[in-house]
DNA sequence: CATGAATGAGATTTCATTCAT
DNA sequence: CATGAATGAAATCTCATTCAT
């Protein structure tokens, strides 16, 4: 019977926070343990290694974002409608899980090779959507480019807001969706 | 140029390569020394610390990109013409200095606070340009958003090409510039 | 027998198996618990420490072998007859309790000093027998040497069989007894 | 240029001493470092891991004993003459390198599986000799049994002397060779 | 009696930096 | 200027033992 409840959850939470703030290598097991309020050794009852914490976090959140995106992408509404919803979903995820989103990006930078071992990545959901839009003739630029424009813009928007360089005003999602839709449909 | 100048350059070169491939903390002084073909102690003849290597690399390449961008941004031609040139310049820098560009991004992720101590960052050049375009009424979205759309898209394009997900075909720069121009000018 | 008695026996059994396979330090309390099918904490209901398990095992099996040997050594038959029976008894013990025999040897290697605290060790039984044979003039080599020849040979035979280098054919005990008897009686 | 000379040699020396006295797991890197007179970290400039120290020691000394034995076993003299020399060589090795011999035995106990990866083990030299003797009809017991008798006896003799139970008198080697020769040739 | 989370001490290993040569 | 052994601090991980449940 656990003395603390959900210690495993707490470890993941603390790790995510610290990794996204300081970096993976820059965060020690001791840092995480201290943040959770346990000792270093206790971490290892829940995870076999620091690396397992890292992988768990990546797969958890990458998959979570994927799920949210794919469920929108597969709705039975118009391409345009779904596109606007996708933009909103993506940004919502970023702003509600800023640590997770930053961590996912960091992971891509530091473990590019490892990323290839994971399935159901966010980009797969978007790629599928872009593909459909392109084949239906609505999206005019090929799917990879559409992906670059959309994901790049949204990610950078999030980072600028996070960095205090940009404001997150009401209607931001709408405005961005508008701009991006025009960009990829040549309207 | 004397031999030691060469060594210093080589150290920076190797460090940049390794940092961009594996991460900063993940790269040891020994790794760098081995890559250069000298020993650990010798590194300290040229740099007082590992951190100095990191800072030198960041300021060097961030400034270099800034210089390239600002010189285009300040040309005496039309906004549109300069915009197309900026896109080309940005992508050229990425594809010609992929390690440097990755390193700059990584540095932003890991040392967000520290970045604020540097001046003449690439985004400053672009921000200035967007500002001018917005004030002249040609660029319709406010400068931060324009920056997000442009930088985000270009960066993501580079990463997709680097990751083997997208091809770098001839005309890519043109196509991107076209798409982005439409996006931020509402044409 | 009550259930906890069974558990205690099982702990000793698992510990013996693991110690003999992997070594004492190399076997953890968790390893033992898992092998028994209980948890770490439960072990401490039956033993105050890992060391107590180790000591219990050593004294149990060292004494058991001693008992078997001394009862043969003290029989009222001829020296030769008893010698042949001793060889058989020794080898039987080895082959029927290979883990115990390996553990006893390992304990001798790792805890040479501690061994001196135990009484009724197998070698005492054999030493006594050799002494008698030497004094009666039947065994020609002094008892220590006789002990070395006999114990060394039997132990090594067991190890060679265990290691798959030698076959345990029928009549092996006879053959060995024959050879050893000749060796120590100069016949 | 080394600050200490032969640090690597000293590490091996200290490790051998401590391993043979206390056991492998029971000896820490700190113990070894302290014995050598350096810090723990310095060990790792000479060996990549504790395990490498262990393996190096085993292969070094197992091979050394093998070399000594095989060179005697392959001499062009009579079987009997060579046998007497082998006994002397074996015991000499034990008494001159007691730590090494104990360590080799310990390694066999703790890493039985790993031993199979090594070539040129002492037993191979002796096995070859016994084989020749058996085929020539001089040695009457099959080679595995002869090996068990000879190696077992010599090893046990060494251990008894080491343990203070037996004296190493002049002529011990002769006496043992005599006894063993009779045992395996049925004379 | 049993569980298994947690502790705490310590083991192995890593690595930026120093320093004797 | 260069070498590379050594330091020393810290990081990851292990594990016998304790203890709340």
Image (cartoon, coloured by chain):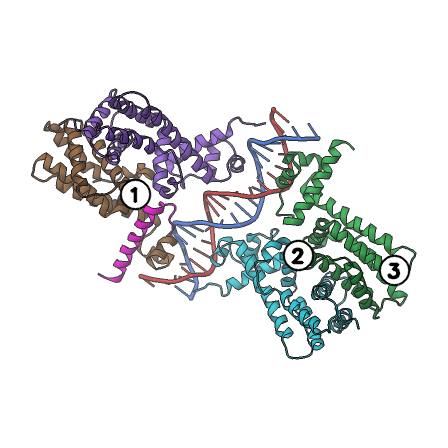
Chain colours: A purple, B brown, C green, D cyan, E blue, F red
What is the chain identity of the residue bearing mark 2?
A: C
Above or below, comparing residue A125 to residue B62 in the picture: above
Residue highlighted by disc 1? B164
**Residue B105 placement: quadrant:** top left
Using the numbered discs, state the Cα–Cα distance from disc 2 to disc 3 in whole angstroms.
30 Å
Residue drawn at 77 percent across, 31 percent down = C2
> Magenta residues, as a range?
B1-28
Q: Mark 2 points at which residue?
A: C164
| B19 drawn magenta | yes
Of the numbered discs 2 and 3, the one sitting upstream in the chain is: 3
The lab-note entry on whether marks 3 and 1 share a chain reads: no
Residue receiving disc 3:
C81
Indicate whether residue A16 is drawn in magenta. Answer: no
- The reply to whether residue C23 is in sight is no
Residue located at (15% from left, 39% from top): B174
Asked if residue D97 is positioned above or below residue B109 in the image, the reply reads below
For mark 1, name the chain. Answer: B
Mark 2 lies on a secondary structure that is loop
Q: Which of marks 2 and 1 is in front?
A: 2
Q: Do labels 2 and 1 share a chain?
A: no
User: Which part of the image, by quadrant, shows the C terminus of chain A?
Assistant: top left
Callout 3 secondary element = helix
- Kindly identify which chain the residue marked by label 3 belongs to: C
């Amino acid at each position: 019977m656990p003395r603390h409840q959900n210690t495993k959850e707490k470890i993941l939470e603390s790790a995510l926070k610290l990794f996204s703030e300081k970096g993976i290598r820059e965060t020690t097991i001791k840092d995480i343990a201290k943040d959770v309020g346990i000792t270093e050794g206790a971490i290892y009852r829940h995870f076999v290694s620091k690396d397992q914490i890292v992988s768990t976090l990546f797969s958890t959140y990458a998959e979570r974002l994927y799920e949210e995106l794919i469920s929108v992408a597969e709705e039975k509404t118009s391409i345009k409608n779904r596109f606007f919803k996708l933009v909103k979903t993506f940004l919502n995820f970023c702003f509600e899980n800023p640590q997770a989103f930053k961590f996912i990006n960091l992971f891509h930078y530091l473990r590019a090779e490892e990323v290839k071992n994971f399935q159901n990545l966010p980009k797969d959901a978007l790629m599928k959507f872009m593909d459909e839009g392109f084949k239906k003739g609505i999206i005019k630029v090929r799917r990879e480019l559409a992906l670059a424009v959309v994901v790049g813009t949204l990610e950078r928007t999030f980072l600028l807001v996070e960095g205090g360089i940009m404001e997150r005003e009401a209607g931001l999602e709408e405005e961005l969706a508008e701009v991006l839709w025009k960009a990829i449909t040549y309207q």
